[in-house]
Amino acid sequence: MPATTEQYTHNLSSRERCPKADDLESLEHLVQSGEETPEPIPTTIKGSIPTWINGSFLRNGPGKFEFGEDKYIHWFDGMAMMHRFHIRDGSVTYSSRFLRSDSYVQNLEKNRIVVSEFGTVASPDPCQSIFARFFSYFQTPQPTDNANVNFVKYKGDYYVSTETNYMRRVDPQSLETKEKVDWSQYIAVNSATAHPHYDREGATYNMGNSYGRNGFFYNIIRVPPPEDKSAVEDSADLRGAEVICSIPADEPRKPSYYHSFVMSENYIVFIEQPIKLNLLKFMLYKIQGKSFHNILSWEPQYGTVFHLVHRRTGKKSPVKYRAAPMFTLHQINAYEDNGFLVMDMCCGDDGVVIGEFTLENLRRESGQAMDEFYNSLCRNLPRRYVLPLNVDENTPLDENLITLHDCKATAMKTNPEEVKAEKCSRVYMTHEELHDDQLLQYGGLEFPQINYAKYNGRPYRYMYACGFGHVFADSLLKMDVHTKELKVWRYPGLYPSEPVFVASPGAAEEDDGVVLSVVVTPRKEKSTFLLILDARTFTELGRAEVPVNIPCGTHGVFNEMG
């Protein structure tokens, strides 16, 4: 029997399903070093800014790509630059600062790159003797504190974070850099993600690695809610942080890279994807002169493993949930529904994308060179996986366990697998495509956001994201996950940041509020603006133009003021 159109499309990779690029423009001007604006400056308002918005839109990302004659290789290596759009009474001011990390300060003092980053290995000091330079290759490099990925919150304090064991506490008003915080001084982890989750009681959850004689573990971390601030001094406080569950790597010698994780009301799911870290290379990479991105590899033969943990007890499910190989950076939302855990996330079929974001690639010329790079990249599309929560020895084999109405995702119990001489139930899952063909023309989507405060971990309807018709986002999207209908904001030559939803006071509907995004362009100098969209209609309410060049960034948050 010939394959149906739906079956054929499902067999194509996410990259193959999206249109090829044709004559893309260069983005070189969006990955040039920026300049600080430490004192707030006014912006020019076009349209109108709702007067009820009261707070600061904080953004983070790489902002400096060279010191002296030394230049970084990878986009992720750029020194962290923090931005603040302060909104009050319909007006907006802008300020920015480089994070005064140890990496930044040491590089600045030496006027060269002296601290290794994700894709750039620091060279030995040319002033050292030949013997000192030789032996420096055998020293284990210290993890960077160049926290250029996100703003995160623990116990009421803001930090900027990357994916090492270091964070930096910052002042969200002045963007002043405060003390460096080492996770390993509080709990036994060697790193933590820049994408924690927050529960409604004020606790923060995250994930971090640990490795030693007993193997490699993925650890779920819980930081308790803030205490009475009037009784606490102005300093970093992660006291009470604990590891609530340690998950052994499915392949101990090849643990997986991960960027985030899933959390619902009662469960946390860690997704062990087949982007593998070669531990032998990890230990030898300094001698080999290889950077971190050179020790990651896409190994689809390992498939994908979903580890289910009860958030309140820390107990890991004995069921092995497996799926076909896929790559994910960001989850959209997850919620429980009648004995099932529904998980929505942005997924691709090729995990080599991370290492390709070198500055050389991002600065390619317009036309064929940029088209070839874009066409080589993975496209991420929204998918839905559903985990059956009540699987035991009585669950039937080889039949679809998903009984949710109008759900195309499947889960089948298969023959049990042996783990440490014990047999455990195994469930194999297939996903539902959480979109229709309209999304493909926008290059898929990434950087998903929802009405997090009200709907994270609960059934929801709307998500906001960036469309990727170029290497950097070139559109903003609102999707109704019930109908898969899209609303789109897109204009040639404009490149928006991750959209952040801000609810209006007393909002009764899920999409009653605004969406904020910082828009940059390579076509005109100093033409950045803060865009404010009506979240319901996805039409522009206003913009705040600022006469500065802002490099393309990563993530941001809205810090609501009282």
Image (cartoon, rainbow, N blue to C red):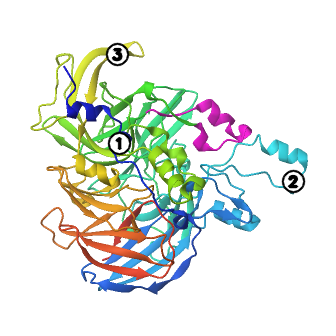
Indicate which disc residue 417 carries.
3
- Give the residue displayed 48% in from the left and 69% down from the top: 233
The residue wearing badge 1 is: 347
Pick the residue in front: 204 or 546: 546
Query: If you read the primary sequence from the N terminus, does the residue marked by circle 2 or circle 1 appear first?
Result: 2
Tell me whether the residue at label 2 lies in contact with that at label 1, contact meaning CB atoms closer than 8 angstroms: no
Q: Is residue 557 visible?
A: yes
As measured in the structure, the alpha-carbon distance from the residue carrying label 3 to the one carrying label 1 is 26 Å
Left or right: residue 301 versus residue 491 is: right
User: Which quadrant holds the C terminus?
Assistant: bottom left
Residue occupying the point 35% across, 42% down: 347
Q: Nearer the viewer, mark 3 or mark 1?
A: 1
Relative placement, left or right, of 278 versus 135 is: left
Amino acid type at mark 3 = Glu
482 in relation to 212, above or below: below
Compared across the picture, whether 471 is left or right of 483 comes to right
Task: Name the residue tied to disc 2.
Answer: 128
Instruction: Give the image location of residue 528, x and y in percent.
Output: 44, 75
In front: 449, or 189? 449
The image quarter in which residue 465 lies: bottom left
Say which label, 2 or 3, has the lower sequence index: 2
Amino acid type shown at disc 1: Cys
> Is residue 291 part of the magenta span, yes or no?
yes
Q: What's the CA distance linking mark 2 and mark 3?
A: 56 Å
